[in-house]
Amino acid sequence: DKFMAISGLARVIQRELDDQYLAGLWKKNLIGDLLWRVYKAQRKIQGTVPDGIYERRWDYSKRADTYRAPSWSWASVDGLVQFGSYLDLSGKPKSIEDSDSAFTKITSPLVSILDVSSSLVNPEDPFGQVGGGKLIIQGQMHRLGTSKQFYQPTTTFRGTSGTAFDDIDAPVSWDVYEEAYFLPMVITEKLYSKFSQSFLDIIKALKDLELS
């Protein structure tokens, strides 16, 4: 069992964090911890169907055949999963500067955790096997705004006009996405005070293209 295998490490981390352990995640950083994803293999094919071009990938990861953890936990998956870097969700500006650019980064949560819990097979072992779990999140659902300019459906965030790609693992009719919704959980803003030269070169090339 995954939890039994890492229980010793989880105990050590819990003493350092003084945090509640919930099916492999930590309560104080739960929003950031929920942003795990399955590992996407590089093996893929592209093809054409009546609805357009599609891309199909084969994942190394899949949902466990027998129950191990709630679906919001990485432990519910057999195979490789990916975590992003630690997110500071305090909303405080963080200045970042390198040789090419400088910017202020602000990361804020877009959801609230109303209730979360995990039930244990052995209530006396908080780092052992999990028998169930509950998670209630409050946030604003967004309808997918799809664009057929790409081979994947794209999402337009209503609040920021930013764009994200939706990973599809099989040909899917575009009509499906007309009734699909998603829940954005965090937003990161970057306010640049100095742009890299490569970025400025791209902007110049685009302007030259418009004038030609």
Image (cartoon, rainbow, N blue to C red):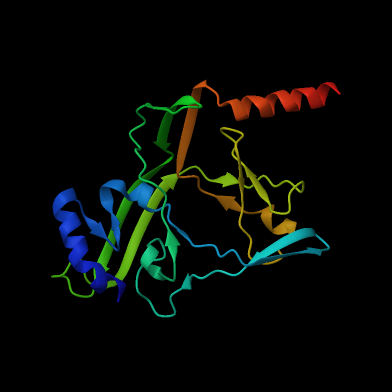
Total labels drawn: 0
Viewer-side residue, 23 vs 88: 88
- Identify the residue shown where x is 55% and y is 50%: 182
Q: Quadrant of the N terminus?
A: bottom left
- Identify the residue shown where x is 39% and y is 63%: 74
- Residue furthest out toward the front: 99
Q: From the top left corner, tell me how far across and down residue 6 is, in percent.
A: 25, 68
- Residue furthest out toward the bottom: 66
Q: Say whether residue 32 is left or right of residue 206.
A: left
Q: Is residue 20 visible?
A: yes
Q: Is residue 18 visible?
A: no
Answer with the quarter of the image where residue 57 lies. Answer: bottom right
Q: Say whether residue 201 is left or right of residue 124.
A: right
- Identify the residue shown where x is 36% and y is 67%: 75
Q: Is residue 174 above or below residue 29?
A: below
Q: Say whether residue 59 is left or right of residue 106.
A: right
Q: Say whether residue 186 is left or right of residue 21.
A: right
Viewer-side residue, 129 vs 113: 129
Q: Is residue 121 above or below residue 146?
A: below
Q: From the top left corner, tell me how far across and down residue 174 is, in percent.
A: 74, 56
Answer with the quarter of the image where residue 145 lies. Answer: top right
Q: Is residue 202 above or below residue 52?
A: above
Q: Quadrant of the C terminus?
A: top right
Q: From the top left corner, tell me how far across and down residue 68 is, in percent.
A: 35, 74
- Identify the residue shown where x is 30% and y is 55%: 116
